[in-house]
């Protein structure tokens, strides 16, 4: 009897001990130095690269064709009188401008809203454009075996625009003779990119789509050809040949992409656009 009671008591004691032990393990707290979940790290946004503004005058101002054996090479074009091309005459009707040491400052002659019309008109008549010397290139583009001088001047408007003028001189009777003046636009808007001679022809490159020369002026822009003045996406190459009196355009006008030099040029883009518009109108 006593033995049975002892066995029963022992079994109950062991079961209670096991039960108590298990409860202690299940409810034990986590160690103080238990690792915590890693915090979420957010990456900083990568800033977009700043677009580098190109040097639009790099070719024009390089060392090509900067000297000549012609007497034009010793002429002082920084102190010379130039005619003003069509569209750039002064309000008083003067058609010439004389550089002194390569520069003439503009006369702005600002008006005010409260001025009477007569006073405004008098002040506006005093306005003058300025001019500054840029460079001179020399090469034979008339076929006479002697270099011509292509003098590039920048119009000073007292504003931010920088249109340019080109004066083509030949040497005749002991002095320069002007045979073609023409104007170009402002940077991406028909601005001057380069001048050079190839196969007896004058090559002119202007920024913009299908921009070329008609007489003394550059053409108007293709509709929709709008972009930042600083950063042209296209330029146009056209060629001109001297016939003894005038420079006449030769061949096709080629519009190139400045962003993709390997892209084929577009030929006579204005005519292409007109043809496409006519075809749409017939549908």
Image: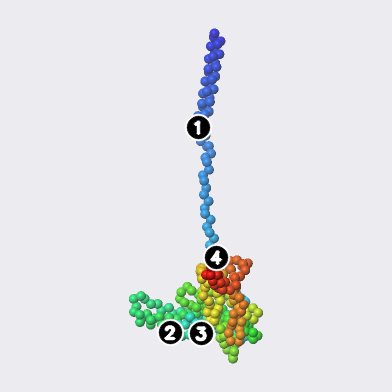
Identify the residue at horizontal 53%, vertical 18% (top origin).
Answer: 13
Q: Earlier in the sequence, mark 2 or mark 4?
A: 4
Q: Is residue 3 above or below residue 161?
A: above
Q: Is residue 55 visible?
A: no
How far apart are the alpha carbons under marks 1 and 4?
Answer: 62 Å
Circle 4 SS class: loop
Query: Which tag, 2 or 3, sits closer to the chain's start?
Result: 3
Q: Residue at x 53, y 74 (%)?
A: 190
Q: Which residue is mark 3?
A: 83
Confirm or deny contact between disc 1 and disc 4 (CB under 8 A): no
Give the labeled residue for mark 2: 92
Residue under numbered circle 1: 29
Label 1, residues with CA under 10 Å away: few <14, some 14-19, many ≥20: few
Distance between the Cα atoms at labels 2 and 4?
Answer: 42 Å
Q: CA distance from mark 2 to mark 1?
A: 98 Å
Point 52% across, 41% down: residue: 37
Local packing at callout 4 (Cα closer than 10 Å; few below 14, some 14-19, many 20+) is: few
Q: Residue at x 52, y 20 (%)?
A: 16
The reply to whether discs 1 and 3 touch (Cβ–Cβ < 8 Å) is: no
- Residue projecting furthest to the bottom: 173
Q: Quick one: SS at disc 3?
A: strand
Q: Sequence-wise, which precedes: disc 4 or disc 3?
A: 4
Residue 192 at x, y percent in the picture: 55, 75
- The residue lying furthest to the top in this view is 1
| Residue behind mark 4 | 52
**Contact flag, marks 2 and 3 (Cβ < 8 Å):** no
Q: Residues within 10 Å of mark 2 (few under 14, many from 20)?
A: few
Q: Secondary structure at mark 1?
A: loop
Calculate the distance from the C-alpha at mark 4 to the C-alpha at mark 3. Answer: 37 Å
């Amino acid at each position: 009897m006593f033995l049975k009671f002892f066995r029963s008591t022992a079994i109950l004691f062991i079961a209670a001990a096991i039960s108590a032990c298990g409860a202690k393990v299940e409810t034990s707290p986590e160690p103080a130095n238990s690792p915590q979940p890693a915090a979420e790290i957010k990456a900083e946004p990568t800033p977009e690269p700043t677009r580098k503004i190109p040097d639009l005058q790099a070719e024009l101002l390089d060392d090509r064709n900067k000297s000549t054996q012609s007497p034009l090479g010793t002429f002082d074009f920084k102190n010379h009188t130039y005619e003003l091309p069509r569209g750039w005459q002064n309000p008083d009707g003067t058609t010439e401008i004389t550089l002194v040491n390569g520069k003439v400052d503009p006369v702005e002659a600002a008006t005010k809203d409260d001025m009477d019309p007569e006073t405004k008109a008098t002040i506006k008549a005093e306005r003058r454009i300025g001019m500054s010397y840029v460079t001179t290139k020399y090469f034979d583009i008339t076929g006479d075996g002697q270099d011509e001088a292509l003098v590039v001047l920048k119009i000073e408007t007292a504003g931010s625009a920088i249109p340019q003028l080109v004066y083509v001189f030949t040497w005749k009777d002991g002095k320069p003779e002007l045979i073609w003046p023409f104007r170009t636009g402002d940077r991406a808007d028909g601005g001057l990119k380069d001048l050079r001679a190839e196969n007896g022809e004058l090559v002119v490159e202007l920024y913009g789509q299908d921009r070329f020369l008609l007489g003394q002026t550059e053409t108007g822009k293709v509709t929709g050809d709008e972009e930042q003045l600083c950063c042209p996406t296209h330029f146009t190459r056209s060629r001109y040949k001297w016939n003894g009196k005038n420079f006449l355009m030769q061949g096709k006008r080629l519009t190139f992409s400045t962003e993709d030099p390997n892209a084929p040029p577009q030929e006579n883009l204005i005519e292409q656009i007109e043809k496409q518009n006519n075809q749409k109108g017939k549908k």
